[in-house]
Each structure stands twice: as C-alpha cells, then as structure tokens.
Image (spheres, rainbow, N blue to C red):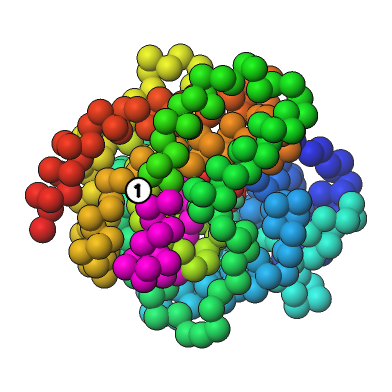
Amino acid sequence: MSSRTFTEEQLRETVSLFSVYGDFRSCVPFGSGHINDTFKVDLSLGGTQVSYILQRINDSIFTQPQRVMENIQRVTEHLRVKLAGDPDATRKTLTLVYARDGKPCARGPEGGWWRMYVFIQNARTVDVIEEPGQAYKAANAFARFQNQLADMPAPRLHETIPEFHNTVSRLAQLDAAAAADVCARKAKVAAELAFVDARRAAASRLVDLLAAKELPERITHNDTKINNVMLDDATGEGCAVIDLDTVMPGLALYDFGDMVRTSTANAAEDERDLSKVYSRIDMFEALARGYLADARFLTPAERAQLVFSGRLITFTIGVRFLTDYLAGDTYFRTSRPDHNLDRCRTQFKMVESMEAQSAEMERIVASIA
Ligand code: ADP
Ligand code: GN1
Ligand code: MG
C-alpha cells in the first residue's frame, strides 16, 4: 500500500467534524506507522497552540471500524479510571476527542473513518532502540498496560483482526500467495521460502498450548513495537502506550515476542545492509528485566516460552511481509520497490540471530527472579 493523499480542504473539513476549538494552523503527516494515515493538527486558541492526532482508520484492514472504536473507548475509559487522581493521567494514556455528533469517530468528506486523540506533549517515539535503559522502560510500560487491563469487566473485547498472530494461519496465507504468485515474484524469493520451510515445525507451538489451555488468554496489546510507546522527553520513562487498534484477547507472549523483535534490533526494520541487522543481547536483558519487573502475573508455562516467543513473532512478521510482497504490497505501507521484501529479510536475519543466542537468552530469563 502506498500513502494516500488528502487535500488541505479535506483535512480542514475533517478536523471540523471533531469537538475542538481554535483557529486552524496546520495538519501534517506524522509518525511512521505502517497502517493508518496519521496527522498532527495544530490549532491556535487564544494565542496558545493546541495539538491533536488525527487518524484515518485503515478500513481495508479494520473492516469494522466501529468495533475497533468500541474496544478503544472501553480500554481508554478503563485506563482513565485506573489513573484517576494522577495529575499526569492525560500523558499516561490516549485520550479520545469525540466527534461533534458525540461518536468516537466520524466519516470524512472522502468517505473514510477518522478519529482524533489529544496530542501527547513532551514525549516521542523511536523506531530503533537507542540504549538498554529505553528497552527496560518500554517493556515496563507494556507490562503495566497488561496489568491495568487484567481486570477489565466483561464482555470480551472484539477480535479486531481474527487469528492475528496465529503463525499457522499466516503460513497458510503465505502458501496461498505463493501459489497465486500474482506479481510473478515467487522465483525471486526462493531463499526466503526455503527459510520458512525449514521452520514450519515450530509454528503451532503457542496455538497448541493455548488450545490445550496450558497458556491463558489475556487482554493484550498485540502490536508492541517500540514506536507504539511514547517515551517521556525528560525522564525517558514509557508514558503512554499507543496504537490501540489491536488491543484484544491474546497471549502475553505475543506482546513480549514483538518487543524482542523490535526492541533488540540493532537496525531499522527495513535496513538493506543485513550485516547491520542482529538482535542485541544487552537490549534483550534490559527488556526481559523491564518486562518481568511488572509482569508478575506470568505463569511458569508462559515464562518457559518467553525466549521462543521472540523468535516466533519475528518469524511470523517476516512471513507477513513476504506474503504481502508476493500479493503485490496491498497491506503494509511501502515507499520503495521491494520494501516488503527488505523488511522480510531483516526479520529472517533477526530470527537467525536469536536462534544463535537462544541459550544465552534462556540463561538471562532464568536468572531474573
Ligand atoms: P499506526 O497504526 O499507523 O502505526 P499509530 O497509532 O501508531 O499508527 O500512530 C503513528 C505515530 O503517530 C506513532 O508512532 C506516534 O509517533 C504518533 N502518535 C500517535 N498517537 C499520538 C499521540 N496521542 N500523541 C503524540 N503522538 C502520537
Ligand atoms: C504494523 O501499525 P504499526 O505500524 O504499528 C502491523 C503490525 C506489524 C508491524 C510491523 C494492524 O504495525 O502487526 O507487526 O506493522 N499492524 C497491523 O512493523 O497489522
Ligand atoms: Mg503504530
């Protein structure tokens, strides 16, 4: 998927659908997410600048945006109650800005579904981790998030994308894309397909343990990449966990695994020089310490799969990039030819790096009380 473009008039009209006040100053693309169209909106109110995040929900991926918004409303409200009395509450969770008709999202002039959040000031996201302290703090924030959601009242949250992390289903999607080979790219990815074939046997481990009730279902974030947590400019602490589209029932292990994938990576997800791509053990140690400091709810069965979950999620996301490459780049936003193939290759290089370090990673997890 390449980026959509919107006219300034469309963006101004979209902003005016929400309950915000002030003179329009600007609305510019923001962040580096692969899924939604994200903008920073600046308004001037009595001489003060007020800022918001405006997002067009990707409704080819989230085919029922209302269900996504129902989940997000329930989750942000639950977090707001948990943070009651905290003077920093609006920086510690996303705050939805409702549309003028009272709904949590609005239909824009071009027909898409849009939502708005208060812009979290004095904090930033990073695409590649910079130092181990950041890994500790990010993991700590995601563990706190899982803790805060542990007692969400019924009903069960909607599954906004069914079988999202199910590696077995993801492999079936890859096989279908390879068989169809709509862009005649299969020959070019023979090495990547062989890499996948050599690892199929382990694909069902977590889904089997879940089906056997040996692993518990929890409310999880499901997209814990490092740029989905805001880090405070002053303290570096993880303040708000963002990108709540896939908060739904899942495995805590998938969240930990995706942190290992992104927070231990030495290079960007789309780095072309694979000699720069590997998983850093110092980052892994900091991440595991930060996560386990707060994720005290983990059962022994979950702890036993922490290291494996890093490899599994990295493999699965590599499989998803490869599938999208074969299918003609319809899912993830791309900005150059072969972008998804480059991303697939970094993931598989990360898997190899984690395989080589798995004994050391297990030793680290075992050493943490
Ligand atoms: P995507 O699903 O496309 O990844 P995100 O919700 O993660 O979209 O938003 C993209 C980027 O926008 C984030 O990585 C972050 O940098 C920025 N962002 C999102 N929400 C906020 C917010 N409330 N305040 C400040 N920045 C935000
Ligand atoms: C997408 O939305 P974003 O960019 O944070 C994707 C994740 C992938 C990630 C890979 C809804 O995350 O599952 O792990 O790209 N989100 C969705 O970078 O598919
Ligand atoms: Mg994101």
Q: Position of residue 307 (x, y in %)?
A: 27, 46
Task: Say which quadrant the C terminus sits in.
Answer: bottom left
Boundaries of the magenta span: 204-227
Instruction: Please give the name of the residue rendered at 38% of the width and 14% of the height, measured from the top-left corner.
Output: 275
Q: Is residue 74 left or right of residue 110?
A: left
Q: Position of residue 99 (x, y in %)?
A: 76, 70
Q: Is residue 110 left or right of residue 265?
A: right
Q: Is residue 33 magenta?
A: no
Residue 185 higher or lower than 245, as above or below: above
Q: Quadrant of residue 44?
A: bottom right
Task: Say which quadrant the N terminus sits in.
Answer: top right
Q: Nearer the viewer, residue 234 or 305?
A: 305
Residue 369 higher or lower than 72, as above or below: above
| Residue 74 seen by the camera | yes
Instruction: Please give the name of the residue rendered at 17% of the width and 37% of the height, measured from the top-left corner.
Output: 359
Q: Position of residue 347 (x, y in %)?
A: 45, 31
Instruction: Please give the name of the residue rendered at 57% of the width and 39% of the height, measured from the top-left corner.
Output: 320
| Residue 132 seen by the camera | no
Instruction: Please give the name of the residue rendered at 53% of the width and 71% of the height, measured from the top-left corner.
Output: 76
The quarter of the image that holds ligand 2 is top right
- Residue position marked by numbered label 1 in the rendering: 309
Looking at the picture, which amino acid does disc 1 mark?
Ser
Q: Nearer the viewer, residue 78 or 260?
A: 260
Residue 354 higher or lower than 255, as above or below: above
Q: Nearer the viewer, residue 209 or 302?
A: 209
Helix or strand or loop: what does disc 1 sit on?
helix
Q: Position of residue 142 (x, y in %)?
A: 37, 58
